[in-house]
Image: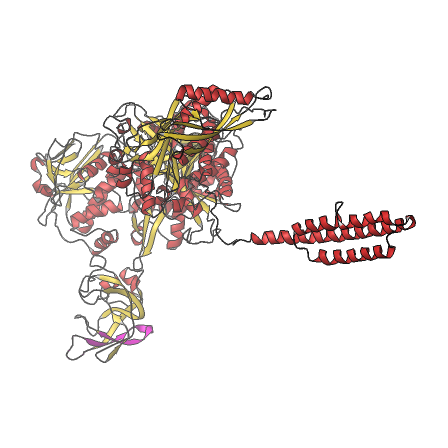
């Protein structure tokens, strides 16, 4: 919200510096995002009186003696065509800063410092300036648009700073407003707050005018869609004379970034900025049927707006129509057919409240955002609807650009624009804050905010102004003491809040749940293996599903879609963490990082039905990705093993197929017979597709399933009193026999086997073709009594016998 | 009979020999050999001299024996000194052989780091858990009701414009704030409530300073007699634990639909102590979180009697906190999994 202080001063006296005002507004909840002096780049420019002006022969230049009062008299060379003896112009002294312009003398190209110069042999001590060089436009200061020197007023005193006389000493504040205060979206709205924070009186803008007896006979307004238009007022103005606006109005519009068009149109824009009420003016002569209808647009109905764009509407859009056709897109823009022209003689002024959400949807769906729609989207109150109309009619009279008829129509739902009485308990107000604000301060604050307060014992009676819709009673909520508390404390000052530590609260037990502790322990285990935690978006791309080559019916393809994604790559809720991990590895490799270990714990989203009709399952999932020359299937298997060991459980692995993993280096991970995940080597074609130079391995574990073993009870095993026995055994077997099979057979053969450790695999040499040798250290642990003499030897014989019988494995001689 | 003088000469000769030969010994092996030749065993020179005793006259035996024993004692003494010296020498030679270039870099065992957001999250949880807060993690997919309506943000509310929401269906959406989970808690649990809800939230915003996904931690206290002053008191403790003893807080008015009054909370700049620096953009203050007294409508929506109970809530952006804490300048770095970034930031 752009706030020029010069405009603000119409309604409230400001006797503090811009810095002090900024601080006070900040404390009251209005952050000044930016503030600057209009002439911030202009320095050391004074009024100069040209005492002598002689042309330099054969040039367009003149050499002038310029009187700058107490600053002295300076010789200045000037090329402007309107320089003349006896003229008063802005003189930039040596060392002054002004805007540098391009060859066209119009385009500003940064700030220049004036230096002593020499032109055609004549020394020049300064520069006479144009309006553009001072940052002015025709609208900001009459004459500033001229391509030559800016002419200063007759009464300008030579040597005086030009900034005050040109209005360049004005300050512009850009204020951030919170969504609950749409009433502050205007100069007047901010003036109310400034008056309150400074404790000054608010001077309301004039709204008086005289109605003639002229009537627009038979004129009617009907509002069909009152849900979208709770208040619509129209007033007929005649004998209109379209002309340029006065300089003061042009300047103010320019200060808030609006172009001046003509008096009548400017009045609507002026009221929008001043009162916060969007207005529209229709040329009566183009309205059919002497009526206004406010209704939903028909399906496919079209309108051509002021800016000559054609829009096709639907019943979701509200339109203003005359007897036959749409003449305005309600709250957004008027129609071309009834726009104000130079020839306009009769005008219907519109001041209305349209439902904010509807204006917003229309503006969004048609892609048409205007000053009016932006204002309506924030919320317009009915108080301003009435005030805005009055102000516009006053300005018509003040500018002398028309006569005010007595035809005024106001269609409303009976909402009052008078203040609403409310009673609140002072004790409750203080109980929100935790401090006791003195009654007189409460009284004073509420008075400054126009709530007309009275205090009777604990009862504070106030009158909520109609523009404070955020404070009005809502349904059963008629005692809005927290809102009053907020008003009081933002004016009283948050620095009055003292720190207490819940003296009346009960003691509660805090901390992590078992599940949260378990997950944290798991993360620490992963870190201890050199794996860094990473975090990816919860959404992924349909192309990720293709990258991982999931078949059409794969559960991973049953992903929840975001209806309004930022882009397609972020349009699906993740059903696997593998794709994000692969992309992360690929990104690292592109940065030249060719080895690393990463993990992520996050949710995958499993819908029960699509589109969603109930909450989907959100399954906590762990994904580990490792890559680099050192990494193998077995390093990943080691990671899995460490996870299991850290939790006191055992994982078993079975060969598994995954579309995106190596056909022979992929396994499922199970615990106590339940499959809880997988790991494997990334398929080479995917590695190539992602331009990955090294092998990568991925693991996913379903933490929802793993979670039941978090914090498992530890059972202590007493150390055996008897010594263990170890035997090294080498076996010769068929090449296809796996380690797993051998281990299973050995364990089945003897219950005293504690540990089996493979220490050598060998082929060739004395080993027959198609066979291999595997050498193990087998540890036997006695249970209740020590092993005697040949006990272990007998165990070994039994193992050998079983291996021979079951797998045709021989003990190597 | 042996001549006593001859024997005496033999003794002197042996002594001289031992003296000479002992001095040149350089290794344990030589020491061992020397010991065998001269000092130990039946065939050693000393033993041989002792054997001469039988050839002496009885009256000479005693003094001779004594002399031999003295020689032996002397020799053993010298020997053990020598042995000590040689052993020391050998040890130092052995060490010298193992002289290495200690400046060659070693490969440290690799330790992974928790994500910066997890680190901050854990730190905050530890602080608030100590104040009696339980941890509740809500779901990322929420209904319109829990994310907005129950939080006093009905369909037409202007505050909905503050947050661009990702919708999954007309009813379901990606939560825009962790406050959504608190409604679930308040529906199930009656006061006293002290809940901390960390989690991911989503807004349709993607530029240099915004990420469509980020993490929040929402705190909620509902009990009898809770006030804005209690909020300030708790936040004071919080900022001192996170940013150091001298840190102070400042409240200023703000707006959230689910709190009334609502405040933005700034803490005194921990980089400059409030003097003004580049981190705090010269203001001396850093915005750290939004908070407020729980709107009584929100309590009522959850079936909690707002006349009996009151509460406060606060929401902290974890990425922002992590970025401030570790000096990370771009939020995107937190989601990029660049190992060069991740390996720099740990618990210290």
The quarter of the picture where residue B152 lies is: top left
Q: Residue A323, percent across and down? A: 9, 34
B156 and A768: which is toward the camera: A768
Residue at the spot x=15%, y=35% of the render? Answer: A319
Q: Residue A779, percent across and down? A: 52, 27
Residue A655 part of the magenta-drawn span: no
Q: On screen, B137 above or below A350? A: above
Q: How many labels does the image show?
A: 0
Stretch in magenta: A54-77
A462 and A593: which is toward the camera: A593
A434 and B127: which is toward the camera: B127
Residue B79 visible: yes
The quarter of the picture where residue A115 lies is: bottom left
Q: Residue B273, percent across and down? A: 49, 51
The quarter of the picture where residue A789 lies is: top right
- Looking at the image, residue A782 sits to the left or right of residue A274; the answer is right
Q: Say how the picture is coloured.
A: secondary structure
Residue at the spot x=71%, y=57% of the render? Answer: B23
Q: Residue B49, percent across and down? A: 80, 50
């Amino acid at each position: 919200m752009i706030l020029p202080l010069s405009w603000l001063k119409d309604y409230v006296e400001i006797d503090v510096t811009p810095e002090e005002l900024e601080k006070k507004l900040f404390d009251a909840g209005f952050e000044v995002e930016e503030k600057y002096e209009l002439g911030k780049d202009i320095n050391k420019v004074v009024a100069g009186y040209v005492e002598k002006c002689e042309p330099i022969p054969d040039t367009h230049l003149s050499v002038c003696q310029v009187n700058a009062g107490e600053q002295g008299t300076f010789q200045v060379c000037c090329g402007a065509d309107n320089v003349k003896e006896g003229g008063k112009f802005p003189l930039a002294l040596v060392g002054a800063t002004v805007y540098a312009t391009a060859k066209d003398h119009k385009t500003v190209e940064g700030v220049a410092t004036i230096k002593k110069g020499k032109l055609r042999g004549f020394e020049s001590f300064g520069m006479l300036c144009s309006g553009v060089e001072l940052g002015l436009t025709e609208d900001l200061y009459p004459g500033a648009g001229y391509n030559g020197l800016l002419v200063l007023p007759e009464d300008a005193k030579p040597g005086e700073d030009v900034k005050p006389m040109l209005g360049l000493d004005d300050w512009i504040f850009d204020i951030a407003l919170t969504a609950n205060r749409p009433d502050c979206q205007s100069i007047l709205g901010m003036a109310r707050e400034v008056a309150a924070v400074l404790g000054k009186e608010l001077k309301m803008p004039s709204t008086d005018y005289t109605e003639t007896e002229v009537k627009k006979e038979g004129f009617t307004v009907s509002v069909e869609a009152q849900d979208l238009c709770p208040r619509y007022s129209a007033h007929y103005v005649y004998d209109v004379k379209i002309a340029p606006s006065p300089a003061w109005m042009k300047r103010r519009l320019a200060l808030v970034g609006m172009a001046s068009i003509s008096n009548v149109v400017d009045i609507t824009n002026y009221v929008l900025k001043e009162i916060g009420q969007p207005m529209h003016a229709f040329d009566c002569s183009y309205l059919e049927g002497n009526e206004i209808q406010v209704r939903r647009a028909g399906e496919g109905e079209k309108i051509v707006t002021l800016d000559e764009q054609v829009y096709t509407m639907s019943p979701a859009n509200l339109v203003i129509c005359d007897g036959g056709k749409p003449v305005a897109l309600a709250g957004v823009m008027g129609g071309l057919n009834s726009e104000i022209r130079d020839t306009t003689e009769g005008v219907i002024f519109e001041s209305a409240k349209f439902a904010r959400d509807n204006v917003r949807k229309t503006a969004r769906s048609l892609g048409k955002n205007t000053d009016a729609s932006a204002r309506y989207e924030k919320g317009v109150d009915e108080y301003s609807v009435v005030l805005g109309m009055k102000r516009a009619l006053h300005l018509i009279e003040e500018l002398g650009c028309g006569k005010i008829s007595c035809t005024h129509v106001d269609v409303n739902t009976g909402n009052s624009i008078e203040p609403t009485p409310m009673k609140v308990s002072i004790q409750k107000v203080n109980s929100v804050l935790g401090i006791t604000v003195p009654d007189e301060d409460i009284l004073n604050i509420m008075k400054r905010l126009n709530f007309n307060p009275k205090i009777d014992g604990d009862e504070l009676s106030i009158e909520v102004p109609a523009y404070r819709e955020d404070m009005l009673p809502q349904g059963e909520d008629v005692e809005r003491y927290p809102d009053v508390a907020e008003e009081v404390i933002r004016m009283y000052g948050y620095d009055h809040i003292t720190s207490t530590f819940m003296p009346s609260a009960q003691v509660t037990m805090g901390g992590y749940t078992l599940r949260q502790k378990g997950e944290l322990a798991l993360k620490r285990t992963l870190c201890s293996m050199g794996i860094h935690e990473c975090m990816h978006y919860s959404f992924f791309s349909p192309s990720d599903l293709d990258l991982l080559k999931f078949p059409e019916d794969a559960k991973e393809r049953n992903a929840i879609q975001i209806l309004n994604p930022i882009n397609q790559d972020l349009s699906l809720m993740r059903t696997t963490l593998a794709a994000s991990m692969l992309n992360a590895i690929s990104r690292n490799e592109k940065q030249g990082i060719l080895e690393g270990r990463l993990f992520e714990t996050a949710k995958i989203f499993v819908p029960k039905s699509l589109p969603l009709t109930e909450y989907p399952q959100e399954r906590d999932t762990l994904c580990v990705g490792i890559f680099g020359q050192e990494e193998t299937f077995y390093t990943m298997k080691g990671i899995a093993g460490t996870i299991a060991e850290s939790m006191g459980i055992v994982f078993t692995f079975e060969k598994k197929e995954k579309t995106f993993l190596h056909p022979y280096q992929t396994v499922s991970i199970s615990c106590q017979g339940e499959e809880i995940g997988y790991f494997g080597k990334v398929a080479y074609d995917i590695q190539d597709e992602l331009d990955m130079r090294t092998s990568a391995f991925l693991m996913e574990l379903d933490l929802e399933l793993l979670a039941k073993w978090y914090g498992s009870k530890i059972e202590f095993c007493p150390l055996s009193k008897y010594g263990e026995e170890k035997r090294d055994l080498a076996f010769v077997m068929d090449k296809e026999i796996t380690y797993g099979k051998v281990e299973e057979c050995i364990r089945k053969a003897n219950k005293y086997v504690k540990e089996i450790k493979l220490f050598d695999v060998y082929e060739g040499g004395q080993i027959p073709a198609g066979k291999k040798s595997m050498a193990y250290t087998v540890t036997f642990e006695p249970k209740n009594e020590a092993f005697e003499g040949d006990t272990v030897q007998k165990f070994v014989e039994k193992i050998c016998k079983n291996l021979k019988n079951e797998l045709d494995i021989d003990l190597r001689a | 009979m042996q001549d006593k003088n001859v024997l005496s000469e033999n003794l002197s000769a042996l002594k001289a020999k031992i003296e000479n030969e002992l001095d040149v010994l350089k290794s344990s092996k030589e020491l061992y050999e020397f010991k065998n030749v001269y000092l130990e065993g039946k065939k050693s020179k000393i033993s041989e001299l002792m054997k001469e005793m039988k050839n002496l006259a009885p009256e000479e035996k005693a003094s001779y024996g004594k002399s031999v024993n003295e020689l032996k004692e002397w020799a053993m003494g010298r020997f053990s000194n020598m042995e000590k010296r040689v052993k020391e020498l050998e040890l130092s030679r052995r060490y010298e052989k193992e002289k290495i270039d200690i400046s060659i870099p070693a490969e440290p065992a690799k330790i992974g780091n928790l994500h910066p957001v997890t680190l901050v999250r854990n730190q905050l949880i530890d602080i608030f858990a100590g104040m009696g807060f339980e941890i509740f993690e809500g779901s990322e997919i929420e209904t319109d009701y829990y994310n907005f309506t129950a939080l006093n943000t009905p369909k037409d509310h202007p505050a909905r414009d503050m947050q661009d929401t990702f919708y999954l269906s007309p009813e379901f959406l990606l939560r825009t704030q962790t406050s959504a989970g608190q409604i679930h808690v308040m529906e199930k649990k009656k006061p006293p409530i002290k809940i901390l809800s960390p989690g991911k939230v989503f807004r349709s915003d993607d530029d240099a300073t915004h990420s469509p996904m980020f993490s929040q931690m929402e705190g909620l206290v509902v009990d009898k007699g809770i006030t804005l002053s209690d909020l300030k008191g708790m936040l004071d403790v919080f900022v001192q634990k996170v940013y150091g003893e001298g840190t102070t807080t400042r409240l200023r008015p703000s707006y959230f639909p689910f709190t009334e009054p609502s405040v933005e909370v700034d803490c005194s700049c921990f980089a400059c102590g409030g003097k003004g620096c580049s981190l705090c953009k010269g203001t001396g203050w850093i915005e750290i979180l939004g908070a407020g007294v729980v709107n009584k409508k929100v309590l009522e929506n959850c079936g909690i009697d707002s006349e009996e109970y009151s509460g406060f809530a606060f929401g902290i952006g974890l990425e922002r906190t992590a970025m401030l804490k570790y000096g990370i300048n771009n939020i995107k770095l937190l989601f990029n999994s660049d190992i060069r970034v991740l390996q720099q930031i740990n618990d210290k």
